[in-house]
Image (tube, helix red, strand yellow):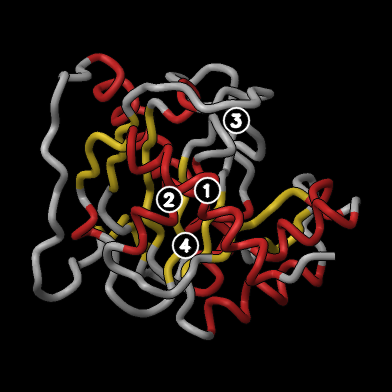
Amino acid sequence: MMSAPLLRVIGRAVFDPPVRRNLSSVTGTDRIPAGGPVVVVANHTSYLDHFVLMRTLRRIRPDAPWFLTKSESFRHPIGRAWATAWQGIPVDRDSPSVRTVREVRAVLRRDGVLVVYPEGTRSRQPERLGSFTSGAFRFAADARVPLVPVAITGAERVLPAGARRFRRARIDVRVGCPLVVADERPASVRAHLLAVAARDWMSAALTEMSASRPERAARDRAPAGPSPSPEVLS
């Protein structure tokens, strides 16, 4: 079985070039907290989303993110090696196990970045969000860490589900403001508020991004300076 470092080298060699070629605009990276724990939630339409997000997050956070990954990906030895190489944390989408919760808490205690696709699986309708699972929002609420929503369009055109080769299409990424609930209401209430706010922002962003896809868009450059203040929900 190949080692994790070798699998990462192979993965970057395969997936980074099509991301670089097709990534047209990335806006809002200055909203990603430069330090401390954070939960990132994004829509999910293509396996390429992993590498789009890693490239986006590396603009601000050099530490590799952790991905909450469906437990099915770990059943086969090859799939398990690949998911582990990319810092996947196995999760049962219907009911996170004690092990999953423990690993997530460890990541956040180490000031890490946790990436979650709240739809739970790749969507076949790229301009419309599916139902959200609650895990990401419970993790953020329980640990009282900022939750950053991200919208991605176009990745499903470059690498559709089941495709064996990459296509040419523009990918756009938009990062939202960090969201926090700073009061003392129960964690379940705070998680619900986070989920509603994140879904509203992501849905609006996807609608706007899909409706206006200009031929050229300037790549943003994250300005130097302090991390943004989170948007406090009430």
**Quadrant of the image occupied by residue 172:** top left
Q: Nearer the viewer, residue 197 or 129?
A: 129
**Quadrant of the image occupied by residue 148:** bottom left
Q: Contact (CB < 8 A) between labels 4 and 2? A: no
| Mark 2 residue crowding within 10 angstroms, few (<14) / some (14–19) / many (20+) | some
Q: Position of residue 176 (x, y in %)?
A: 28, 48
Question: Which tag, 4 or 3, sits closer to the chain's start?
Answer: 4
The circle on residue 131 is 3
Amino acid at the residue labelled 2: Leu
Identify the element where label 3 is drawn: loop
Identify the element where label 4 is drawn: strand
| Mark 3 residue crowding within 10 angstroms, few (<14) / some (14–19) / many (20+) | few
| Mark 1 residue crowding within 10 angstroms, few (<14) / some (14–19) / many (20+) | some
Identify the element where label 1 is drawn: helix
Amino acid at the residue labelled 3: Ser
Q: CA distance from mark 1 to mark 3?
A: 20 Å
